[in-house]
Image (cartoon, rainbow, N blue to C red):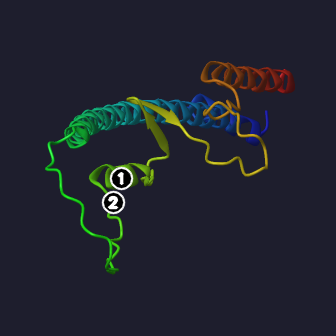
Amino acid sequence: MSQNQLHVRRGRELGQASPFAILVAALLGVLVLALLCTGGTLILREQQAEELGATSTAIAIANATTLAENARVTETVAAMETEAARPTATATSTPQPTNTATSTATNTPQPTATEAIAQIDQTPTPNIFGTSIFQGTATATSGGTGTGGTGTGGGTLPQTGIELGPAIGLALLLLLGLAIVRRLRTG
């Protein structure tokens, strides 16, 4: 046996790792790191979904309160209009002679309380949340597609890529293939 072959054999006996073993360990480390990152992302998404649910509940409660208050105001205005429409007893006046021509000032009509409230109700309020609240339920509004489409995507993002299970299976399959190729090369 030559000096080099003896040195290589002693190195393996002393625990030096081959480059192949180092690469496999590195790939396994990357796989574990990817799994940890995926788990962290899933946990963060779950927390964000809970916060979003609490926010939408608060908005729905605020909208229900506003709708109830608006209903009370509408009832009050309707009662005031009904009261104003009742006939009142008026004194009859004696007709004046029409011989003299008099000028009269014409008053410009002033808006009534009902017309003012109707104008306020017709003023659209800006929606800064990107949702339309109608009868206590939140629905997504179309923000445009950017490609000239019809915007009928359903409000969800398309699912692209592969799921977590198949990704792990593919990674393990690649590692198995790497090990088989290594054995065929050395054997």
Q: In which quadrant of the rendered image does the C terminus lie?
A: top right
* Among the 4 quarters of the image, the one containing residue 58: top left
**Which residue shows up at 51% across the image and 32% down it?**
38
Nearer-the-camera pick, 104 or 144:
104
As rendered, which of 15 and 70 lies closer to the eye? 70
The image shows residue 178, relative to residue 62, as above or below, that is above
Residue type marked 2? Pro
Helix, strand or loop under label 2: loop
Count residues near mark 2 (Cα–Cα under 10 Å), then give few for <14, some for 14-19, many for 20+. few
Q: How many marks?
A: 2
Q: Are marks 2 and 1 in contact (CB under 8 Å)?
A: yes
**CA separation in Å, label 2 and label 1:** 6 Å
Position of 183 with respect to 91 (left or right) is: right
Q: Which residue is mark 1?
A: 115
Which residue in the structure is indicated by mark 2?
111
Q: Residues within 10 Å of mark 1 (few under 14, many from 20)?
A: few
Q: Position of residue 46 (x, y in %)?
A: 41, 29
Residue 45 locus on image (x, y percent): 44, 34
Viewer-nearest residue: 18 or 152? 152
Whole-percent x and y of residue 42?
Answer: 46, 30
- Residue 163 lies, in percent from the top left, at 64, 24
Left or right of residue 156, residue 102 in this image? left
* Residue in the picture at 78% in, 43% down: 149
Q: Nearer the viewer, residue 25 or 44?
A: 44
